Structures are given as C-alpha cells and as structure tokens.
Amino acid sequence: MKPRRYLETHPWITFEFRLDQNRLWCLLGEAASKCQHLSGTPLQPALARELSQVYLVKGAVATTAIEGNTLNEEEVQELLSSKRRLPPSQEYLQREVENVIDALAQIDEEARARARTGEPFVITPEWIREKNRIVLSDLDHEDYVVPGEYTTVQLGAGNYRAAPPEDVELLVDRLCSWLNELLKPLAEAEIAADMRFFHAFLAAVLGHLYIAWIHPFGNGNGRTARLLECAILAHSGVVPWVSSNLLSDHYNRTRTRYYQCLDLASRKRDVLGFLTYSAQGYVDMLREQIDRVHGQQRRVAWINYVHEVMQQVPDGATQKRQRTMVLCMPADRAVRRAEIRRLTPELAEMYAGKTEKTLTRDLNRLQDLLLLRRSGNLLYSCIDQMDAFLPIAKNCPP
C-alpha cells in the first residue's frame, strides 16, 4: 500500500502528545480553579444575560479580527441592537461576524441540550464541516471554496503549506477519533472537576492546532478551529459558557505571538509551547473576567446597601436626590465638589435651581450616613465598604 503523502510533507501530524511540563500543569490548575469559582458565582438574571452577550460579541469579533475583519465590539453591539445594515461595500464584515455569532449560539444550544440529557459530546467530521458551512455562509469566495466541503486544491496560509488535499478526509477522521478518545474520561461520573477540565482544555487546544495544521477547507479554517476549541470547553461540564470562548480574545490580542507559536508548533514540533501560550492566556483572560464579575456583584451590593441606609431619610425629593447623587459617584476615582451636580443628566436636572447650601446639606447628610467621604474639595464613594474580604481600597482616604 502506498504511504500517505502527508507522512512525508507533514511529519508533525502524529495524533500523539505527551504532557510532562510542570508550568503547564500549574497554569491548568489555576484555570480549572477559576472556572469553578466562576461557575458558583450568583448574578442577577439581567446581569448574567448582559455578560453572556458581551462575551459572545467579544469572541466573535476577536476570531474574525484575526482574519482581517475591522469591526470592533462597540460597532457590532450597535449593529445587533439596532438591526441596521452596513453600506453594501462593508456588508461582508457584518456577515462574517454574524456567521460566527450564529455558530456560537448553536454551540451554546447544543451544550445546554446535552447537559439536560447527559449525552456526551462526540466530535464528528460532519459537525466540523457544518461549523465551517455556517462560518462561510452568504459570503463571496474563490471558485475553489465550497462552504462545509473539504478542499480539493493545495492550500497555503502565509508560508505554511496545508496538508495534501487527498489526505484531508483521512486526517479529519483521525482527528475526530483522537479527540473523542481524549475526551472519553469526561463521560465518567466520578472524574474530579479539575481532571475533567485538564482533559477538555488539552483536547480543545490540540483540536484547534490540528485543524490549523490540516487546513481542510478552502477558507475559514482558523475560525472553524477556534469554534471547535470553544465547543469542547462549552461541553466539558466545568467551563461556564461565558468563559468558553475567551481564548479567541487572547489570540487576537497577542496575534503576532499566536502566529509565532502556531509556526513553532509545526516547524519545531513545539506543541507544548502552543499549549503553554494558550493556557497562560486563558488564565489571564479568566482573571479579567472574574474582576468584571466581582465589579458587577460589588455594584449590586452597593445599590442595595444605599437603598437600605437611605431609609433613615424621610421619603421625598430630598431622599431621592441624595440617593441618586451617591449612586452616580464613580467607584474608582475622586470627584471635585464643582463636578458633583453634573455627574449625570438626571442629577443635573435634580439640582437645577438649587443653591450651594442645598448641595452642602446633601453632602453632609451622605457623609453622616457613611455613604461618601470628603477630603478637602474631593469627594469619594464609600463603595469600598462592600470589600469585606479585600485589602483596604486605595481610592478612599481614611
């Protein structure tokens, strides 16, 4: 039997990997711990939906930006909320992002359905091809590109030469079998959460890497690879949905390093280097996400506390004005007395026609209630009272 050509052209595609690096294990341990921490974090439903939407858009914008899309997160959020369309010459940019959002929404739905039934996630060539079809839907392509179909021509990406087209089907089949074998322990009920995460993360990043190496489609290989990575994490049972697509943002922020690590993984067979780079980025992104969630929880706790304390003030316009003032104050910086009336349009309207004596009385009352502090002409929110288990906040004087 004639040997497969990829064995000669792509000897690094071995479907083998040995993990024996302490730094990677440490990073994976921290990432697993942070995912567990996030999984147990309660959020109000509206905030949870908002956070999910923010990270859905972040991931979609990031994975398309790697491929040259120039839309930013604010533009995409506006397009989604207003349902407006870009001019004809730019419509393809919007379509690219919307395709990825559609694919991510499908992954989320699949993961939730399997969580309800307990059915394991089995990666198939058909699943991978379907995601590529969605990614490339309704976009203009070269004649040799057929969305969701394997390439029949020899491809390249920069200096990288893709696997021989005649070997693509075999390689994708082997990849699916290998990844499913790596993920098999996730079906065991007794497996610990950290080990479940280790298996899922390694399979996710290796799946991403091998799709990039094989390059099975005429276009959209990078986006398809990153969708596979996201899907494996989303189906793991230990990674919250909002954290499943963080790696795309990491790759986009460090794009030069991303391409460098991809190159070294094949040219120098440094798979461990790519895994470590991905794991470090994932930990960093999880830290950012936890800080954001903590910020939201802190704000909710502060609002509830302010409403509780303000019950000591008689109902009426004065109470509403004072409460609005303290809730308008920024949490991370001081405000000069001269600024306070104009913090928001609502507050400016409340103080229209009011004298400086009224402002002074309001400030004195809020200071007596320990809701703000003053240092000369500088005013500080006392939101740091919510930080029971954190070091003393630096933004408020003693």
Image (cartoon, rainbow, N blue to C red):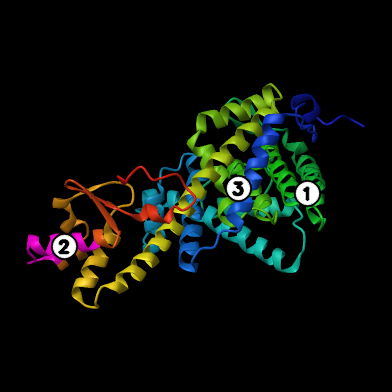
Q: Amino acid at mark 2?
A: Ala
Q: Which tag is nearer the camera, tag 1 or tag 2?
A: 2
Do the residues bearing badges 1 and 2 touch, measured as CB atoms within 8 Å? no
Q: Position of residue 220 (x, y in %)?
A: 58, 44
Q: Amino acid at mark 1?
A: Leu
Where on the picture, by quarter, is residue 320? bottom left
- Provide the residue span drawn in magenta: 351-366
Residue 350 as seen in the image, left or right of residue 289: left
* Residue located beneath label 1 in the image: 183
**Residue farthest bottom in this picture:** 315
Q: Earlier in the sequence, mark 1 or mark 3?
A: 3
Q: Nearer the viewer, residue 192 or 144?
A: 192
Residue 148 falls inside the magenta stretch: no
Dot 2: element:
helix
Q: Residue at x 36, y 61 (%)?
A: 84
Mark 1 to mark 2: distance in Å? 58 Å
Mark 2 to mark 3: distance in Å? 42 Å
Dot 3: element:
helix
* Residue located beneath label 2 in the image: 348
Q: Nearer the viewer, residue 221 or 311?
A: 311
Q: Position of residue 336 (x, y in %)?
A: 18, 48
Q: Which tag is nearer the camera, tag 1 or tag 3?
A: 3
Q: What is the crowding at mark 3: few (fewer than 14 residues within 10 Å), some, or many (at least 20)? A: some
Dot 1: element:
helix
Q: Residue at x 68, y 66 (%)?
A: 113
99 w.r.t. 144: above or below:
below
50 w.r.t. 320: above or below:
above
Residue 356 falls inside the magenta stretch: yes
Q: Which numbered circle lies on residue 34?
A: 3
Q: Position of residue 217 (x, y in %)?
A: 65, 43
Do the residues bearing badges 2 and 3 touch, measured as CB atoms within 8 Å? no
Residue 295 as seen in the image, left or right of residue 170: left
